[in-house]
Image: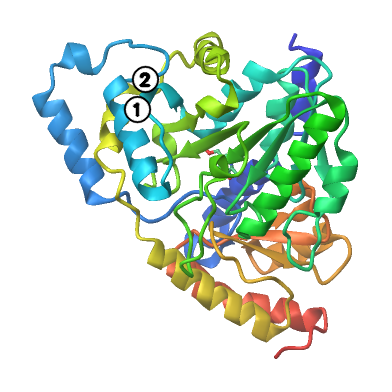
Amino acid sequence: MISEKMKDLVNNNSVIRQMFEEGQIMAEKYGKDKVYDFSLGNPNVPAPERVKETAISLLENEDPLALHSYMNNAGYPAVRKKIADSINRKFGTSFDESNIMMTVGAAAGLNCALKAILNDGDEVLTFAPFFVEYKNYVANYGGILHAIEPDTSTFQPDLAAFEERISSRTKAVIINSPNNPTGVIYSEDTIKGIASVLEKKQKEFGIEIYLISDEPYRELVYNGDDVPYVTKYYDKTIVCYSFSKTLSLPGERIGYLVVPKEADDTNELFTAITIANRVLGCVNAPSLFQKVVAECLDEKADIDFYKENRDILYKALKEAGFTCIEPQGAFYLFVKSPVEDEKEFVAEAKKEHILVVPGSSFAGPGYVRISYCVSRETIVNSLEGFRRLAEKYGLAGL
Ligand SMILES: Cc1ncc(COP(=O)(O)O)c(C=O)c1O
């Protein structure tokens, strides 16, 4: 018999995954080219050529025993040093290998960070809409996640509501920029505002609050906008990075955490995070792909492809009369549902063979998320269906 906690998770199994599975069934029934599946954030441009070349070269030239062996829980020191140097070059920081722990993607990075800091009953805050797994990750360690309602005119965090919501039990805040599901980049003013609220509340309550910056989409930015490097604004920051999207390597499970010494000058936090990595069963990040990414730190998958997808879809949706803000990064559009209950709209869209995810899965009811990391044909061939939906709901096109 499975545990009560797992029963809840089984009964509320991810809507996104369910839609993906439904999409596969529909594709079999109607033909793959007749189903427009915008449900999953799975990169669909290949990894840069250098990834393959580096992997082959490592497999051919390195001592296999060394290449595939266990290691320090934090990962290869030389890889961590290269990553620290690369961050320093890009953002003017001063990290070294003692600030970097290699992780099994951002998902495991978040879990390691949360395990290292949370006590039972601790509160973690985040800004709605948010990546749905945060709630599960926080609950894994006895924490409780609270979401702050969005300002839907910009989808930048509402700082007044944030300040109001912090309590003496607040242990951490998770932010995600560029954001899944809105595509919004948190501006420098927003980051400064969050930092100043946190400084104030730490003093007021005599507590320590960590800011966890979840950044798997950091490099997926379309108009040259800056994504502020959060450690420069607030000392108690933990950066959670992943190569899943930037290098199109989600299945390889590779990323890292940055733990600045300002976050904890005793080094206890870094040690706790590496032990969390071990006791959670990750042990260490995949050895081959640590070495691969260390040689690909200046590489990016072809993000122009996503940008063109974004431009085509955004323009067509606006012209048809849909409401949404132009995403600055990541590969999602967060579109206002033409009816209050967005699940009704999701069901109508399905009749057009268009699969989109209800915003309530991200604590953003009344909206739907469209992942545009799909083929160009999927984008172009779906447009008629979106136009028919707009007509059905009487939306006024541009
Ligand atoms: C906001 C956010 N955080 C974390 C993750 C997990 O990424 P990873 O594949 O690196 O575990 C995702 C994946 O979609 C995401 O969208």
Q: Which of marks 1 and 2 is in front?
A: 1
Task: Name the quadrant where ligand 1 sits.
Answer: top right
Alpha carbons under labels 1 and 2: distance apart: 7 Å
The quarter of the picture where the N terminus appears is: top right
Label 1 with label 2: CB-CB less than 8 Å: yes
Instruction: Please name whichever residue, 128 or 231, is drawn nearer the observer in this view of the structure.
Output: 231
Residue 33 x %, y %: 48, 65
Instruction: Please name whichever residue, 262 or 333, is drawn nearer the observer in this view of the structure.
Output: 262
Residue 66 x %, y %: 20, 13
Residue 95 x %, y %: 41, 32
Residue 61 x %, y %: 9, 26
Q: Quadrant location of residue 134?
A: top right
Which residue does the image show at 62% across and 53% down from the upper left? 179
- Give the SS element for disc 2: loop
Instruction: Please say whether residue 273 is visible from this viewpoint.
Output: yes
Mark 2 sits on what residue? 75
Which residue does the image show at 60% across and 34% down from the upper left? 235
Instruction: Please say whether residue 145 is visible from this viewpoint.
Output: no
Residue type (three-letter) at the residue carrying disc 2: Gly
User: In the rendering, which numbered label is found on residue 62?
Assistant: none
Mark 1 sits on what residue? 80
- Give the SS element for disc 1: helix
The relative height of residue 75 versus residue 340 in the rendered view (above or below) is above
